[in-house]
Amino acid sequence: MPDQSLPFAVILLTAAIAFGSPAGAQDASQTPQAEAVLDMEAIEKAFVARDFVTVRKGLEALAAQSDDPLVQYRLGRALVQGLGGPADRVGAIAALEKAVAQNHAPASVLLARIFLAEGEFYRPERAASLLAAAAPRGNAEAQYRLGVLLSTGVGVPQDVTAAFNWFLAASEAGNKEAQYELSKAYSRGQGTKENVTEALRWLEESAGAGHLQAQYFLANAYENGPEAFRDAGRAVDWYRRAAEGGFAIAQRTLGTKYLTGDGSLAPDATEAVRWLEAAAERGDPGAAQNLAIGYLSGEVLPQDDQKAAKWFERASTSGLGRSSLAYGQLLEAGRGVEKDFEAAIKYYVKAVSESEKRAALLLGRKAVAGELEGYMAAQTAVPLVGLVLQEESDEAARDWLQEQATAGNRPAQRQLGLWYLAQEDGAKDAAPLLDAAAWAGDVEAQFQLGKLYTTGTGVSLDYVSAHKWLNVAGAAGHSEALEMRAVVANLMTPDQVAEAQSGAREFFATARDRTPQTDQIVRDAEGNVVSSGTSD
């Protein structure tokens, strides 16, 4: 009896020697039996079983033996999708081209999709030709995709009428994407006459087939469409279908309805959070913003400053200006987050860059009040204060700009000068400010000053000065200044033109001596203010 303490491999080897042949050995004269080539039925069974390795190997073996278009198409599809191995677009294209050569319409569509994907294989003209060959043979996807190319002019000359016809053909064949596009074409009168009834009919067809965008817009039509079509209950049902399908905007809309209650739905905190969080997690900043407002107000959701801050910050990272503003205000007040004025300023500035006007006005008022000293250079604050002056006619804002202008702040000179220009009889006050900014190199001030001299508004009529400043502004790329300079030149004598040109040359020759001083803020590596002041 073998020693049970010996390794199994040793026991097996000993037994094999005892019987006269090594375990698993094969006569050297024999060759391994070739692996049998699977037929399509066996490959399909493997596919159903999700054994994609077998599928891929089987298709590769069949494709090597035959140019059958179905085999080539299925191999191409497996290679594109990366089934049973790495994705291989080069191999997929080769296989699909063989199927296309035999007029295999699905292969034409798949190959067209490869050529329409951005990247190294992008060939829209070739894609269009493939689709144009498959569409007349009744392939609904080819008809739809060809319609898209024709409607946008990608790969083919734009032809909205032809696009409409292909959308119609694909829609009648049941293609839900085409039905959605057809609905849009009818609603906009694009390639056909505007027809609201047909637009709604095809929108319903597409929505009923599961097209999420169609479901959302059908819900919107039931809510806000023609009076005879409106149905609040159906609107909610379609919003819910789209939301349950994962369409973020529908989730946000449904969640907001539960948050606010709009007559068709009663407020429901649980449902509001469920749908708004789902949309926010999908990256919808509006949903995060609405969640934050809900937690901040505490009217339906439990009042929670920390959760409000969390969702405002989330929406801010997506570039939503009103959320950046709100998060900055929480930072400034220390609500839900640690109080941090410097961080609040950064978020206010971010909101301004995201076109949030209220943030610009807020910063402008803070600059006037002196709250931004050490946090923002005066030159940076000038347009913000200018907005406060423009929107609110605030005397303190005007005085702040005047103080900066007097100190040689070029943007303040221009900003205040332009504001005076917009006031009735304000040209006389604008002229010296624009003159100072123009000499400091401000192109817009140079142009506006040239205009004043052209008409004698707020200054004496002076074509020489007008030509000079328009010439200087034009040299900096101000196209309107160049056009106006040409008009003024026609009103001048050759000597006057020569004098104006000499004045322009003198301006440029002495420009380096007029480098304006600018406010500087110096911070250390951690962002702390080290010093502030002016430098040449």
Image (cartoon, rainbow, N blue to C red):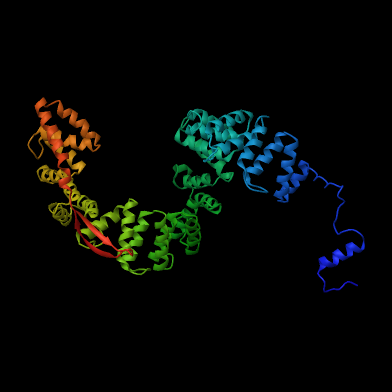
Pick whichever, 207 or 394, lies toward us: 394
What residue is drawn where x is 18% and y is 55%?
397
x and y percent of residue 133 in the render? Answer: 60, 28
Q: In which quarter of the image is the N terminus?
A: bottom right
Quarter-of-image position of residue 338: bottom left
With 411 as the anchor, is 346 left or right in this view?
Answer: right
x and y percent of residue 217 in the render? Answer: 49, 45
Asked whether the viewer can see residue 454, the reply is no
Pick whichever, 12 or 77, lies toward us: 12
Q: Is residue 26 above or below residue 15?
A: above
With 523 as the anchor, is 499 left or right in this view?
Answer: left
Asked whether the viewer can see residue 416, the reply is yes
Pick whichever, 450 or 289, lies toward us: 450
Q: In this view, does 86 lie above or below 166?
A: below
Question: Which residue of the protein is positioned furthest toward the left in this rendering?
Answer: 460
Q: Is residue 156 above or below residue 58?
A: above
With 463 as the anchor, is 285 left or right in this view?
Answer: right
Tally of numbered discs: 0
What residue is drawn where x is 64% and y is 39%?
91
x and y percent of residue 365 in the render? Answer: 22, 58
x and y percent of residue 369 in the render? Answer: 20, 61
With 206 as the anchor, is 443 left or right in this view?
Answer: left
Pick whichever, 521 or 353, lies toward us: 521
